[in-house]
């Protein structure tokens, strides 16, 4: 009974964190649309050049270290050594604080060097503005780790939402005020960076309040036992990197673009203003892929904890069926999201970002949804089984290959070359990770019938949506203003494509009814699929 309760509690907590992650990812992707509309492509370029620096450091420290600390604290509690937890917590806080101060010094005092390396000295003030957020990371990581170690995922989930809501609000309101009073886009970018600082500070205040009310313990005389410093630091480092590396992949690829795209455009004869705007247009692909990953990967990643829970079980259902289902779900929805977005992208581009510029480049960029979703899924399953070192190496190789390919392709093809480079790098990572996974588990993810069903559903969806979009653009809604026309066509085409894909998916029974029941909101899909195939 106790084990069942623990499993239910764990899954409930995991579900809360998953829902919070969905909300945070959606907000992170969606706020970029009104932000770009406020500052234009040049302003968007300015913000996107600096954002990866802040994103990488905060993801590693506030997320990775929180997971690492919670695991270490949980292990000590399970072994009956709760009396050493204050020492472990103190070591963790000091270690993360030292790293945060070092990163702050690097970013604040090295801002001029980094900005010069990106080809735009004016970016230095954005780096300095964003660097303050790093100083909040030790407190945030320790508080999150403390709550997670006792199985209380609710406060962590709520804190993530509070952080993001405050951050997005400050960014959009602050940017609107700056833009309405000034034409200094770098000042608008600095304001957006300060939004991250205010958001993280709100998260610290929120968790501190909850900690004071619920987890704070009175001072008691505990058994004193010295613990070694190095094992704690080593575990914190290794676990934090392995826990956050997959989340960092997309940010690391953006960081490569920050150092290469703008510079290479300038070196190949493009004027500075034009290069800024071109990079800003290219950066429109970031929120589009983020949205695609949310749609495609969240459902599959939601059941990954089951893989970790059943990995070492000798009795009952093994992890293999869950691995197979996880891969099939990720593949299904990533294909649907990528193809659906590609078909309507010119209209989506204008609807969200005011113009249809570089729509083909963004189509190529959007293919990354498939590879990112599959890589994240495989990485999560490998992490669940304790295999992290080799996959982490694969991700690092992928980032290096992106850097090399950018240098080769951008001079010849411009920003299209960078989009192609991103896809090739991710295909390379996926191939390595898939081969490594297959070496560890001799399992077949799906039968040929599954891939045939996905192919038929995808072709049907693409054909119908393409025909509809052409007719709607030339006949049905040609009387509307251009951007309004794109809004109507985008929303109606997406809805049409989703309906066609789901109906075809259900009729082909690509995913069985009993498998739908394992997925969030899958009961309704299973019921619909049974009704649709009742004659059969």
Image (tube, rainbow, N blue to C red):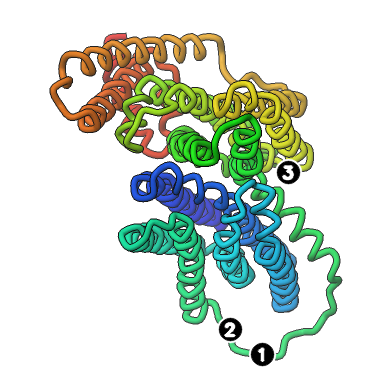
Can you tell which quarter of the image residue 429 is in?
top right
**Above or below for 315 versus 494:** below
* Image position, residue 274 (x, y; %): 49, 36
Using the image as rendered, state which of residue 67 and residue 528 is in the foreground.
67
**Above or below for 95 versus 436:** below
Disc 1 crowd rating (10 Å Cα; few below 14, some 14-19, many 20+) is: few
* Image position, residue 168 (x, y; %): 40, 57
* Image position, residue 7 (x, y; %): 54, 51
Tag 3, which secondary structure?
A: loop
Residue at numbered disc 3: 386
User: Residues at badges 2 and 3 in contact (C-beta under 8 Å)?
Assistant: no
Tag 1, which secondary structure?
A: loop
**Above or below for 214 versus 395:** below
Using the image as rendered, state which of residue 304 and residue 137 is in the foreground.
137
**Furthest-left residue in this view:** 479
* Circle nearer the N terminus (1, 3): 1
Using the image as rendered, state which of residue 430 and residue 211 is in the foreground.
430
* Circle nearer the N terminus (2, 3): 2
Mark toward the viewer: 1 or 3: 3
Whole-Å distance between the Cαs marked 2 and 3?
33 Å
* Image position, residue 505 (x, y; %): 38, 18
Identify which residue is drawn at 64% across, 53% down: 115
Total numbered badges shown on the rendered structure = 3
Identify which residue is drawn at 72% across, 22% down: 442
User: Residues at badges 2 and 1 in contact (C-beta under 8 Å)?
Assistant: yes
Residue at numbered disc 1: 220
Identify which residue is drawn at 39% across, 44% down: 40
Identify which residue is drawn at 71% across, 90% down: 221
Question: Seen in the image, is 477 located left or right of residue 47?
Answer: left
Can you tell which quarter of the image residue 233 is in?
bottom right
Residue at numbered disc 2: 217
User: Residues at badges 1 and 3 in contact (C-beta under 8 Å)?
Assistant: no
């Amino acid at each position: 009974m106790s084990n069942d309760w623990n499993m239910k509690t764990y899954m409930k907590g995991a579900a809360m964190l998953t829902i919070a992650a969905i909300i945070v990812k959606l907000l992170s992707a969606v706020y970029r649309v009104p932000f770009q509309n406020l500052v234009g492509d040049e302003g968007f370029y300015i913000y996107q050049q600096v954002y990866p620096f802040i994103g990488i450091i905060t993801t590693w420290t506030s997320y990775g270290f929180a997971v690492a600390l919670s695991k270490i604290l949980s292990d000590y509690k399970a072994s009956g050594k709760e009396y050493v937890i204050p020492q472990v917590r103190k070591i963790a806080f000091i270690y993360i604080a030292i790293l945060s101060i070092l990163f702050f010094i690097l970013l604040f005092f090295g801002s001029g060097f980094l900005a010069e390396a990106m080809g735009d000295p004016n970016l230095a003030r954005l780096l300095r503005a964003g660097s303050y957020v790093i100083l909040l990371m030790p407190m945030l990581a320790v508080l999150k780790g403390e709550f997670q170690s006792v199985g209380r995922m609710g406060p962590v989930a709520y804190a993530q939402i509070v952080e993001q809501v405050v951050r997005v609000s400050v960014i959009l309101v602050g940017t609107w005020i700056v833009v309405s009073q000034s034409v200094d886009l770098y000042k608008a970018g600095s304001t957006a960076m300060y939004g991250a600082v205010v958001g993280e500070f709100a998260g610290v205040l929120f968790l501190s309040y909850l900690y004071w009310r619920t987890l704070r313990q009175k001072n008691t005389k505990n058994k004193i036992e010295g613990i070694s410093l190095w094992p704690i630091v080593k575990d914190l480092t290794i676990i934090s990197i392995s826990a956050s590396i997959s989340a960092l992949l997309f940010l690391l690829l953006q960081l490569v673009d920050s150092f290469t795209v703008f510079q290479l455009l300038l070196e190949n004869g493009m004027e500075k203003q034009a290069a800024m705007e071109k990079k800003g247009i290219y950066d429109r692909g970031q929120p589009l892929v983020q949205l695609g990953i949310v749609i495609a990967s969240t459902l599959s990643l939601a059941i990954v904890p089951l893989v970790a829970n059943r990995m070492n079980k000798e009795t009952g259902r093994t992890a293999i069926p869950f691995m197979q289902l996880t891969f099939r779900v990720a593949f299904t929805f990533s294909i649907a999201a990528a193809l659906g977005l590609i078909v309507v992208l010119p209209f989506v581009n204008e609807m969200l970002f005011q113009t249809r510029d570089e729509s083909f480049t963004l189509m190529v960029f959007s293919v990354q949804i498939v590879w990112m979703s599959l890589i994240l899924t495989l990485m999560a399953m490998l992490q669940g089984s304790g295999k992290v070192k080799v996959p982490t190496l694969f991700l690092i190789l992928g980032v290096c290959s992106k850097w090399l390919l950018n240098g080769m392709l951008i001079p010849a093809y411009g920003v299209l070359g960078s989009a192609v480079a991103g896809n090739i790098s991710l295909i390379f990572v996926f191939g390595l990770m898939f081969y490594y996974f297959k070496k560890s588990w001799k399992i077949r993810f799906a039968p040929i019938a599954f891939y045939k069903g996905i192919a038929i559903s995808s072709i049907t969806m693409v054909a119908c949506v393409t025909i509809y979009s052409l007719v709607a653009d030339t006949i049905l809604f040609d009387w509307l203003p251009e951007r309004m026309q794109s809004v109507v066509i985008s929303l109606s085409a997406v809805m049409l494509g989703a309906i066609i894909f789901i109906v075809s998916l259900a009729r082909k029974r690509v995913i069985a009814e009993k498998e739908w029941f394992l997925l969030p909101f899958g009961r309704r899909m299973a019921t619909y699929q049974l009704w649709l195939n009742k004659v059969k």
